[in-house]
Image (spheres, rainbow, N blue to C red):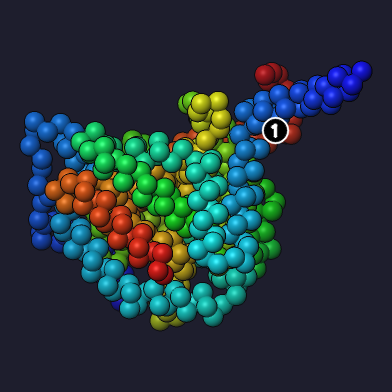
Amino acid sequence: MHRRPFFLALLLTLPMLALLVTACAPRPPADDKEALADYKQTNDPLEPTNRFFYKVNDQLDAVTLKPAAEAYRYALPDGVRDSLHNMIINLNDPTVFFNDVVEAKPRRAGDTLMRFMINSTFGIGGFFDVAKHWGYPNHDADFGMTLGLYGVPPGPYLFIPILGPSNPRDLTGFGVDIADWPFTWLVNGTTVYALEWAYYGLTAIDTRARVLDTLDQVQKTALDPYATIRSLYRQRRESQIEAIRNDNRATVPAWFPAPAGQTN
Amino acid sequence: MLERRRFLPLLALAPAALFGRRAAAADPAGFVREVGDQLVAVINSSDSMASKRGQLQKIIDRNVDVDGIARFCLGRFWRTATPQQQQDYLALFHQVMVNSIAGHLGEYKGVRYTLGRVAPHDDTVWVDTTIKRPNNPDADVQWVIANANGGQKIEDLVVEGTSLRLTQRSDYASYLQHNGENVQSLIGAMQRMLARQSQG
């Protein structure tokens, strides 16, 4: 069974493919300073290619993932969808933990570890977010953010088929997170495969269902939905990285007695 | 005697009026709660969509720095626009703002929100809220409050880390870039967009 390496390889070749069929956005002349500043800020040299993939994706989405997400939202009550969402993020916690550690954020890593242990047991396999009520709130972490925290720039905007908005940094992070997710390396077997693909499928539908109204709103109100999504994606990633950077909570709880001899 | 009796109640009211204004100027959270309650009350009412839009427009025009946001969103093209174009653009932008804010709060019944932290941010104050609306995950929305001309105004909404005015600005910038940097064609596109929205 060599399907998984194939899947990984496919994901990593996609950006290369995109580069091959590349058409470049025209760079404004150097004497038009403001237009040049816009061009640099947008940082989307592959815009024509990206727009092509955006359009393909949008049309595919309209007949596949979107109706699936709408049916999912229609058929299942809020509570059930919330539980499934909790289960999904619980299974992803090992990856979050790995990134918390690499980010050198011990308090966040501790939160994640406690969340995984509490929710997998008391939360019945992650279906209930008990840990949230016990003082261990959920937070985001993936390897794209970790790289960003260490100062790696995102690079030019990329719109990847199926995956959606990205950039070289976040795409690399996506590949690394497949590798650092322990369930990727489970011993092969038909059941394991079925479960993993069910997980991927459910994750896709859950993610899509959670942004149904937001994306509808963008399609309805934006003059250029492609550019609006590009801006939203950039800002969102940047704010997530900022949130990690600003989370400097102490590792030891405030009520914990300081060791003898230590004064502050 | 008569004079004093007429004057006294006024005197008693004066400090209340003074402190009332001061409290409003120094209390961004109170301001957000006031505006938020008004917006939510309109959205959750059972009035028609058209009537709701009219009421939202009034609240937004009163409390949001719409003209300032509009100028920001047009960026460098504001200067190249003719006075007539500026005027048309501003008028349309007021309607855009209603749809945009209503869109983030949800246009349908059942929206609720909770207030969170208040923190200074450069020369503005950010007030955290969490918006809860049916069928959607909770959204963290920060209200950016600035003191302008003595009163408080909402300068931006930051939804899940994304600034409403920054996003709007890049939308317009991209549209202009692909349409010959022509402000008149942007105005036309805004008109068509608003006409489509008021139908559906």
B168 sits left or right of A85 in the view: left
- Across and down, in percent, residue A15 comes to 20, 58
- Across and down, in percent, residue A80 comes to 60, 73
Foreground: A163 or B15? B15
- Please give the name of the residue rendered at 50% of the width and 28% of the height, measured from the top-left corner: B148
Q: Is residue A96 visible?
A: no
Q: Is residue B75 visible?
A: yes
Q: Residue furthest right?
A: B1
Residue A199, by quadrant, is bottom left
Q: Is residue B123 above or below residue A216?
A: above
- Across and down, in percent, residue B116 comes to 63, 42
Residue type for callout 1: Ala
Tell me the residue that label 1 is attached to. Answer: A254
- Please give the name of the residue rendered at 23% of the width and 69% of the height, measured from the top-left corner: A56
Tell how many labels: 1
Foreground: B124 or A190? B124
Q: Quadrant of the C terminus of chain B?
A: bottom left
Q: Is residue A124 above or below residue B147?
A: below
- Please give the name of the residue rendered at 38% of the width and 56% of the height, measured from the top-left corner: A177
